[in-house]
Image: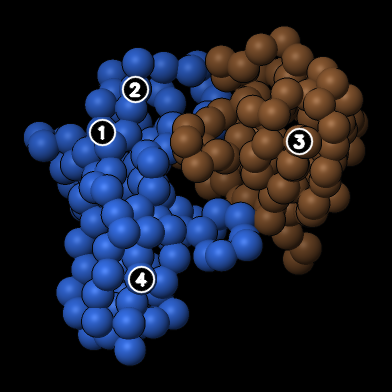
Chain colours: A blue, B brown
Amino acid sequence: GDSVTQMEGPVTLSEEAFLTINCTYTATGYPSLFWYVQYPGEGLQLLLKATKADDKGSNKGFEATYRKETTSFHLEKGSVQVSDSAVYFCALSDHGSSNTGKLIFGQGTTLQVKP
Amino acid sequence: KAGVTQTPRYLIKTRGQQVTLSCSPISGHRSVSWYQQTPGQGLQFLFEYFSETQRNKGNFPGRFSGRQFSNSRSEMNVSTLELGDSALYLCASSVGTGQNTEAFFGQGTRLTVV
């Protein structure tokens, strides 16, 4: 079945450092891809999404490009802030489920940004 | 515009009991999905409802059930609770259903089974 694999955390960076969180997926068909962020004690918030190959999703300085040839959707940010500290989840829509919104998530990557 | 509201936020139950969790979606949203989040298994899909009909179900035992009402509010029920059911249960709502639909998540209900 479809699956998502994220790089293991935690990832610890200094403020203003460059961030990359790797995400690769296995899927039949053409899923949509998402990055969600979870702050402590909160639910998930959609950070960005891409619905087809070569699409670039971007939001709040974060961006990710849907790469079908490498089945990847890596999250990047040029300069992280302490407020970016959170858990980041890569997800795909389950194309195998006929016309439903079911999401399949990676295991999450904890990001800690130090001042 | 109010977000997705889940009640209660925290719950402590004893093994063998049953529990009902509630989710009120964003106004106008007709689809509600439920996920279980645990440190070991991560985020796992439980089920999805659209217009009071279950559209999809994850790989969970029959002790886990849900329903959706005509106002799109949803409940999930877990019977005969086990220690392993301790988790954060997240509800997500969306306008419709389909793979491009954006899901909005609530803050979750933290269930502890003792």
- Work out whether B17 lies above or below A109: above
3D distance between C-alphas at marks 4 and 3: 30 Å
| Amino acid type at image mark 2 | Asp
Q: Quadrant of residue B22?
A: top right
The quarter in which the C terminus of chain A is drawn is bottom left
Determine crowd level at label 2: few under 14, some 14-19, many 20+ residues with C-alpha closer than 10 A: some
- Work out whether B20 lies above or below A114: above
3D distance between C-alphas at marks 2 and 1: 7 Å
Q: Earlier in the sequence, mark 2 or mark 4?
A: 2
Q: Which residue is mark 4?
A: A112
Q: Which residue is mark 2?
A: A2
Q: How many marks?
A: 4
Helix, strand or loop under label 2: loop
Image x and y of residue A19, in percent: 22, 68
Helix, strand or loop under label 3: strand
Whether discs 4 and 3 lie on one chain: the answer is: no
Q: Nearer the viewer, mark 4 or mark 3?
A: 3
The quarter in which the N terminus of chain A is drawn is top left
Q: Which mark is residue B113?
A: 3
- Chain letter for mark 4, please: A
Q: Which residue is mark 1?
A: A25
Q: Quadrant of residue B95?
A: top right
Residue drawn at (42%, 38%) of the image: A105
Q: Earlier in the sequence, mark 4 or mark 1?
A: 1
CB of mark 1 within 8 Å of CB of mark 3?
no
Q: Earlier in the sequence, mark 2 or mark 1?
A: 2
Helix, strand or loop under label 4: strand
* Towards the viewer: B110 or A30: B110
| Amino acid type at image mark 1 | Tyr
- Chain letter for mark 3, please: B
Whether discs 3 and 2 lie on one chain: the answer is: no
